């Protein structure tokens, strides 16, 4: 599983900076709306900007985290190197389970946020 995530992370490597940009611009826009807009002027943008922030930073962290997964060893390793390699791959396995759970949760939250936003502002 972590090897597949590594391939995906490397395949979408070009989205690293754009996803970071989307996340940071969305967060900055949220801060500006919350701090400087009064009377509900920017309320209709809060939900889309929140979703953009969540997905932008999540995509960036996925790419940065899983592009560095250690490969399976080609040659036999010494005991200490093998143990270090196994622990490293196990760590990435745990991180991948967390990421899959977080992605599923973000998908549910995003669907809920979009349904609320469309109900309130979609017409």
Image (cartoon, grey):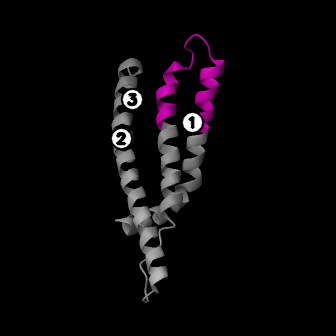
Residue at disc 1, secondary structure: helix
**Disc 3 target residue:** 113
Q: CA distance from mark 3 to mark 1?
A: 15 Å
Instruction: Label 2: state its secondary structure.
Output: helix
| Residue 74 quadrant | bottom left
Does the segment drawn in magenta span residue 80?
no
Q: Which residues are magenta?
A: 25-51
Report whether 122 appears left or right of 18: left
Q: Give the position of the N terminus as an image quadrant.
A: bottom left
- Label 3 secondary element: helix
Give 14 or 86, whichever is nearer the viewer: 86
Measuring 44% from the left and 76% from the top, which residue is drawn there? 83
Asked if the residue at tag 2 contacts the one at tag 1, i.e. Cβ–Cβ closer than 8 Å, the answer is no
- The Cα atoms of the two marked residues, 3 and 2, are separated by 12 Å
Q: Is residue 43 above or below residue 86?
A: above
Q: Quick one: label 2, few (<14), some, or many (20+) residues within 10 Å?
A: few
Question: What distance separates the C-alpha of mark 1 from that of mark 2?
Answer: 20 Å
Q: Which mark is residue 76?
A: none
Q: Residue at x 45, y 86 (%)?
A: 77
The extreme bottom residue here reads 75
Q: Position of residue 107 (x, y in %)?
A: 36, 41
Q: Earlier in the sequence, mark 1 or mark 2?
A: 1
Q: Residue at x 51, y 59 (%)?
A: 65
Q: Residue at x 58, y 10 (%)?
A: 39
Dot placed on the residue nearer the N-terminal end, 3 or 1: 1
User: Which residue does the numbered mark 1 point to in the structure image?
Assistant: 26
Q: Residues within 10 Å of mark 1 (few under 14, many from 20)?
A: many
Residue 72 percent location from the top left of the image = 41, 78
Whether pointer 3 and pointer 1 mark residues with C-beta atoms closer than 8 Å, the reply is no
**Pointer 2 residue:** 105
């Amino acid at each position: 599983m972590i090897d597949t995530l590594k391939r995906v992370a490397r395949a979408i490597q070009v989205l690293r900076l754009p996803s970071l940009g989307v996340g940071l611009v969305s967060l900055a826009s949220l801060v500006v709306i919350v701090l400087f807009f009064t009377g509900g002027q920017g309320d209709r943008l809060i939900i889309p900007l929140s979703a953009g922030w969540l997905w932008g930073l999540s995509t960036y962290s996925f790419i940065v985290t899983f592009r560095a997964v250690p490969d399976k060893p080609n040659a036999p390793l010494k005991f200490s190197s093998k143990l270090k390699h196994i622990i490293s791959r196990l760590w990435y396995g745990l991180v991948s389970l967390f990421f899959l759970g977080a992605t599923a949760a973000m998908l549910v939250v995003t669907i809920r946020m979009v349904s609320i936003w469309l109900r309130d502002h979609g017409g």
